[in-house]
Image (cartoon, grey):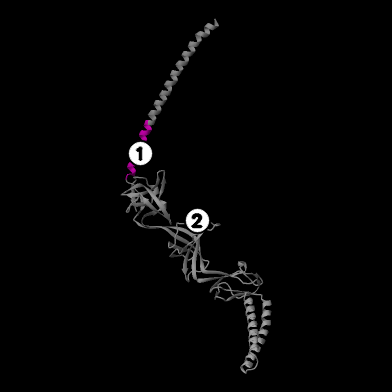
Amino acid sequence: MKRSVYLLLIPTIILAACGGGDKSGKKAEAELTKLKKERAALDEKISKLEAQNKGNDSGKATPVSVLQVQPQTFSSYVEVQANVNGEQNVTATPQAPGIVQSITVKVGQHVSKGQILARLDAAAVEQQIKGIDAQVALNKSLYERQQKLWAQNIGTEVQLLSAKTQYEATSKQRAALIAQRDMYTIKSPISGVVDAVNVKEGDIASPGNPATSIRVVNSDALKVQANLGENYLGQVHDGDPVNLVFEGRQDTMRTKLTYVSKAVDPISRAFQVEVRLGNNSKLHPNMSCKMQIANYQNNKAIVIPVNVIQKTADGEMVFIADGNKAKSVMIKTGRSSNGYVEVLSGLNPGDKVITEGYEEVDNGEQISVE
């Protein structure tokens, strides 16, 4: 009996469920219809407002500044820090080791070639010189007497030659001691200016030791030297135009590259470049400057400021003034230098590139050129 009741209830439940699904579907469909009507009403309002704003803005134009491009000479530079040195820049040291007794020059002093810059202790050699001086004087006297006797036909030729030989031998010994004493001095190998004194009284100076030396620079023959990374090999050459920028003096010197090393330093991986200047009263050794080497030049280049270029997904773009409207133009650029870039394609002579206000415009918008 219970089983029969359950069987009768099942169809009733199924019918109830089906009836509820129909109501839910109708409700969702009604909601969708309502939202579509609301969206249509919003779209209509938006269209009206856009048309109104367009009508209101139809008389406005964005103020801009332009640069009318024309072919011009464009150069790109390799810039590196450089130093002024003397063509002759030598480090003077003694020929023999010894204790420094006196220094006879100071930094900035002009000296001549062979001038003594410092003296070392040579007491032992001085004593030998004093001893040989007496012997030289005696032998000289004996030789002169023998000459007088020979003139009077007194004595033999052997006696004369013996006296002469002894005198000449002791004279040579004295000259050798004088040369040895000179080895205990520091002399200037060139004429120039004392650039550095790296020794003081009481120091032990030795041959070839820069720690106990005196540097002399010939300021009559100056040169500017710099080191470039090996990646610039082949990009700079003898005769390339060069600007030497002395920022402290607010001065720029235009000259040419006179020397490019063909070998790369194995440690620094750099090579040396040089500009010889000769005598220049305005420059001094150890001054610093910027060396700008012109390694590229185009006499008919289209050039624009780098900052007006905008990067897009399609490449580089600038705005130009096309009548009273802004026009976007895709360009291809080459080398850059000092805030300017060479335009290889996309611009023509006479085009007016927008240089101010380009951030506020879009393609086709009205502009007013100031």
User: In what element is the residue under mark 1?
Assistant: helix
Q: Which mark is residue 271?
A: none
Q: Residue at label 2?
A: 230
Q: Residues within 10 Å of mark 1 (few under 14, many from 20)?
A: few
Q: Is residue 87 above or below residue 314?
A: below
Which image quadrant: the N terminus? Answer: top right
To which quarter of the image does residue 91 belong? bottom right
Q: Residues within 10 Å of mark 2 (few under 14, many from 20)?
A: some
Marks 1 and 2 in Cβ contact (< 8 Å): no
Residue positioned most to the top: 1
Residue 44 lies in magenta, yes or no? yes
Say what amino acid the circle numbered 2 marks. Answer: Glu
Point out the stretch of residues depicted in magenta. Answer: 40-58
Q: Amino acid at mark 1?
A: Glu
Is residue 129 a member of the stretch shown in magenta? Answer: no
Q: Return the residue nearer the eye: 186 or 84.
A: 186
What residue is at 53 percent from the left and 9 percent from the top?
6
Distance between mark 1 and mark 2 Cα atoms: 61 Å
Compare residues 235 and 125 and report the one nearer the observer.
Answer: 125
- Relative horizontal placement of residue 118, taking residue 253 as reference (left or right): right
Measured as percent of width and height from the top left, residue 222 is found at 49, 68
Residue 117: % across, % down? 59, 74
Q: Position of residue 313 (x, y in %)?
A: 41, 43
- Residue located beneath label 1 in the image: 50
Magenta residues, dominant SS class: helix
Position of 283 compared to 332: left or right?
A: right
Q: Is residue 84 left or right of residue 37?
A: right
Question: In this rendering, is residue 303 above or below 93?
Answer: above
The image shows residue 81, relative to residue 171, as above or below, that is above
